[in-house]
Image (cartoon, rainbow, N blue to C red):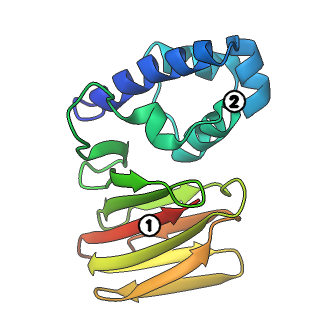
Amino acid sequence: MSERQAPVLGHLAANLKRLRQQAGLSQDALAKASGVSRRMLVAMESGDSNVSLSTLDRIAAALGVMLPDLIVDREAAGHSPVLAWQGRSGDSQAHLLQSTPASRLAELWQWSLAPGERYHSAAAPGEWREMVFVLDGTLTIALPGETITLAAGQSHAYRADGPFDFANEGDASLRFLRNVII
């Protein structure tokens, strides 16, 4: 766990335990409802485990809450960007910038991927849609049955009901915005 990841893991630990207890669920019951192992839940509640965004989505769905409810510091004034994922390179990151109600929720993310970095996402639960807009570099999105390559200034919308990858196959840093609509 890096210094930059520590705050979000602390918020996750506190929020997860509070939300689980408010729902009247034991760790075993939440593990069964979410498909996440009890061992992982124990590690998350103690702030000792980095976790994928898809795992957080499954836990949020089982608790009947949204992803920001798990990772945002609710005591902080306003809503500042939250580092929610970091790759092998410190230059590869995903920050939740903002969220707002949609049919359920809409999230705006800022991503950066260093050259050679890849992020894998499991299929999202339900009818999720996503849109991306490339700020700098070239983004490759590997969707089921197709691969999309986008240069700076280009955008793409897609369903997120299947697994997909974001990749920076270029030699320059990549920055893009990701809008998740639930």
Q: Amino acid at mark 2?
A: Val
Position of the C terminus by quadrant: bottom right
Q: Which mark is residue 73?
A: none
Residue hosting label 1: 179
Q: Position of residue 133 (x, y in %)?
A: 36, 78
Mark 1 lies on a secondary structure that is strand
Q: Residue at x 49, y 54 (%)?
A: 101
Return the mark for residue 36: 2
Q: Is residue 20 visible?
A: yes
Q: Is residue 82 left or right of residue 125?
A: left
Q: Tag 1: residue type?
A: Asn
Q: Position of residue 26 (x, y in %)?
A: 70, 10
Position of 1 relative to 21 (above/below):
below
Residue 170 visible within the image:
no
What residue is at 51 percent from the left and 15 percent from the top? 18
Q: Which of these two is toward me, 113 or 159? A: 159
Mark 2 neighbour density, 10 Å: few (under 14) some (14–19) many (20 or more): some
Above or below residue 53? Residue 63 is above
Q: How many marks?
A: 2
Q: Is residue 26 left or right of residue 174?
A: right
Please name which of the two marks, 2 or 1, marks the residue nearer to the observer: 1
Q: Residues within 10 Å of mark 1 (few under 14, many from 20)?
A: many
